[in-house]
Amino acid sequence: MSSFLQRLKERKLFQWALAYLAGAWLVMQAMEVTAEPFGWPLALQRGVTILLVVGFFVALVVAWYHGEKGRQRASGPELLMIAALLAIAAILLTILRLEAEAPATLYTGLPVEGEKPAIAVLPFDNFSPNPDDAYFADGMHEEIIRQVSRISGIKVISRTSVMQYREARPPARQIAEELGVGFLLEGSARKDEDQVRLTVQLIDARVDEHVWADDYDRDLTATRLFEIQDDVARRVAASLAARLSPEESRRIEAQPTDNLAAYELYMLGRYHFHTRRTTGRDGLERAAEFFRRAIAADSGFALAYSGLADLCAARRFYWRYDPDASPSARRSEVEAADSVAAWAARRAVALDSASAEAHTALGVVLTYVEHDWEAAEREFLIAIELNPNYVTAHNFYGDLLLFRRRWDEAIQAKSKALELDPLDAVHRAQLVRGLWGAGRLSEAAAQAEAVTPHLPQSAVGTIPDEETRLEAPPSHYPEVHIYYEMGRSYDDALDALVEALVRTGTSRELAMAYEGRWEGLDWEGLWLADLSVSASLPCHWCQAIAYERLGRKREAVDALRTAYEIREVGFLWPFFSPFFRTLEDDPRYQELLLEMGLRP
């Protein structure tokens, strides 16, 4: 034993080992310090660790044979041991490389040749200790969706559909089947003072196996948050074998703001904006305040402007005005919101011409406020080119095409919106309207039957009663008239409308009239009842539909003219429906269409 220790001492084995370990420790520290700033991939860090571990044993072998001065010639056993160690290192590095490349090979067997790989980013769990930081997990979730959706080679499911799995999360395969995807990205977020941790994992839902998982521990700065989003998007692209174009790479890498306060205020604005279907006016007011504060913190933050523009435009769909307010007061409120929306949208485009959100916001303003149809179409097409997965762009572009009666294109746009947001009943209901307007009644009926079970979770089903009086009954007209025009029974049409109205708890007077089955009731009686409800709201374009159905064409055109002049909420929708086809030979109606730029 003493002889062996003496030989170790002579060969300076301990000195070699300590020197090597000290050097390896310095290398590991350098990797840790530079990994975040330089974005070293995890595979590289693991590879360096493997080489350092194997290198330690190589150093011991070299020390044993050459540590004693004067013995420099390599022997056979020495070379054999070094070769064996290098072979082990090569095997480990090969395994590591195959592991890193495995995601790309997993997706080679697509169900349909040439089909894009599809992914859904599930809601992130919130692990922040402060309950007020719940917005942060939602914000990072939405921002990662935004980044991944910029990759044209991947189909990305919209936020609205994936949020259905916030509380209850079925098995991965079931979620994938319901959303029509092959991959799921899930994770959690924790914000604690000036630190943040994001845990993300990619799942191949077809085989229910994890592809990769990673933890991101970073300082809480805007730059670090965007770096996390950038890295996740690129790893998803690599895993799904989707090539990033140079333009897409630049857009993903770009940082919309370096101001953390502005970015957090923006995320708070989006957080409250997404509650608009249940909170109505209160949620929109809170969101507006946060967007304005984000703009004040960073006047060059384009996303904050587009968020404010979206919000102001959304008042046309979700804002419910004081029922006791005069028409002039309502008109003033609409005009003020429209003015802010137009300013914010144009400012967003000027600040970031590569933002699909900004171009979509401007397209909405040009459609619903300024009625500049050609300019609006250009903006929507730019947005779709920049982000083909941005469901909002497809949806509002579909609206524009419906208003202009370009049926096939409109149905294609609405179908695309439904493909990207398959669990949102609103998109399916709007597709029903498009098919109905195009006269494709059998298809419309099938879609109407599919949307009915989801209506309680849709916008119409969840907004409080006092805020939905302008949503119903018109929102359910298509379903009823599809039944009627297809030759189905009168009772079937009534049953469909009664069920919808009772389920949503709106327009109770009309629902009771329908449900009561007045003796001898006919369509004239129904429309007279509807006219009474519409006049009490008031809803002029609703009255126009009732007047037209009753054959009172002059009053129908007068009501439409009033709705147009005061920019009434939802007044554009009836123009593409079959309701007003009987007005086509009325010069006053044609004059109105010409003035609006909608003349067929």
Image (spheres, helix red, strand yellow):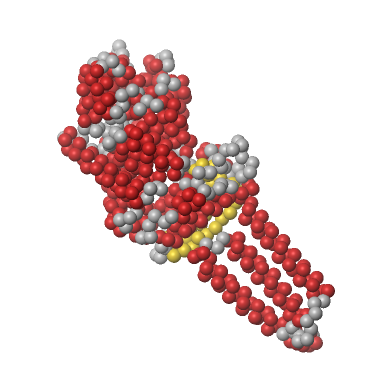
- Image quadrant in which you'd find residue 468: top left
Please tell me which residue is depicted at 28% across the width and 15% down the height of the picture: 585
Please tell me which residue is depicted at 69% across the width and 74% down the height of the picture: 56
Please tell me which residue is depicted at 72% across the width and 61% down the height of the picture: 91
- In this view, which residue lies farthest toward the top? 520
In percent of width and height, residue 535 lies at 21, 26
Please tell me which residue is depicted at 27% across the width and 25% down the height of the picture: 594
Q: Is residue 6 visible?
A: yes
In percent of width and height, residue 105 lies at 64, 48
For the residue pair 505 and 66, the one nearer the viewer reads as 66
In percent of width and height, residue 572 lies at 30, 29
In percent of width and height, residue 284 lies at 29, 45
- Image quadrant in which you'd find residue 132: bottom left
Measured along the vertical axis of the image, is residue 430 above or below residue 302? above
Dividing the image into 4 quarters, which one contains the C terminus? top left
Dividing the image into 4 quarters, which one contains the N terminus? bottom right
Q: Is residue 462 visible?
A: no
